[in-house]
Image (cartoon, rainbow, N blue to C red):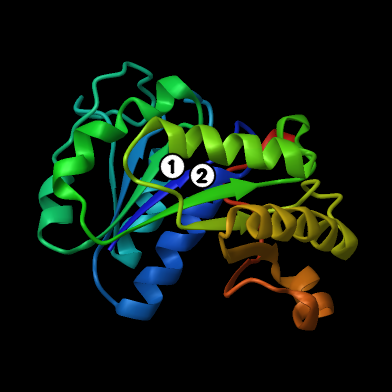
Amino acid sequence: MTYIVTGFYGSGKTEFTLNLAQEIAREKRGRVTIADLDVINPYFRSREREKELAPLGIEIAGSAIENHVAQDVPALSFAFLSRIRAGEDVIIDLGGTENGLKLLPGCYSSITDYELLCVFNKFRPETDSVDKMIDFCRKINAFGRLPITGLVNNGNLLAGTEPEHVLDSQKLVLETGDALNLPLKYTLVREDIYSQISTQIASEKVITFAAPQMRKKWQG
């Protein structure tokens, strides 16, 4: 299966990608490849977690340059396409702008079975209303020939996240899904918060985490 993950800057798209990869690796006990194709926001890069992910069977495919972890040079490798064609689980972390989406057509001929997931966080100004979420989805669908298949709720305020923040964001994402006939596929939520609202989560699947993986130490 190929999973394509997109979302506005600050939506938590890369955080979701890392957690999704670990969930798939646990369930299937096979290799999972993350294709880091987000050239729009190189500040939070999944390839920074290569060493931690490798023992779990998760590999990062990003820059074509050796020792690329700290490189921001847009020299991307598309070697991961052979894994897609072989039917392996590959997650494409894709920038959520028009320029970010321009990399996707290079993958079309290899992708058959796929999910295209849009990650939303109500507490980002670009997606703080149903109308804005709908507009984003329509722009994604208008760009290429792989339509969105599902939505992801990642409603949070970082360390200040409370249960009501997750549920408030869920309400908007559900309304967006109703308007576009798209399911709420996933919720990404901290373990301690999920324990308080588990019966109120409406997504098909829930991915929980103990602590964010992409926050810098100095950011708390």
Q: Residue at x 45, y 47 (%)?
A: 5
**In the displayed structure image, the side of residue 6 where residue 131 appears, left or right:** right
Q: Nearer the viewer, residue 88 or 50?
A: 88
Q: Residue at x 51, y 44 (%)?
A: 14
In the rendering, which numbered label is found on residue 14? 2
| Sooner in the amino-acid sequence: mark 1 or mark 2 | 2
Asked if residue 131 can be seen in this view, the reply is yes
Mark 1 sits on what residue? Answer: 46
Q: Quadrant of residue 195?
A: bottom right
The answer to whether residue 189 is above or below residue 16 is: below
Q: Quadrant of residue 65?
A: top left
**In the displayed structure image, the side of residue 54 where residue 96 appears, left or right:** right
Asked if residue 45 can be seen in this view, the reply is no
| Local secondary structure at mark 2 | helix
The answer to whether residue 209 is above or below residue 134 is: below
Residue 154 at what x, y percent from top left? Answer: 67, 54
**In the displayed structure image, the side of residue 106 where residue 73 appears, left or right:** right
Amino acid under disc 1: Ser
| Local secondary structure at mark 1 | helix
Badge 1 density bin: few <14, some 14–19, many ≥20, Cα 10 Å? many
Q: Are marks 1 and 2 in contact (CB under 8 Å)?
A: yes
**In the displayed structure image, the side of residue 8 where residue 126 appears, left or right:** right
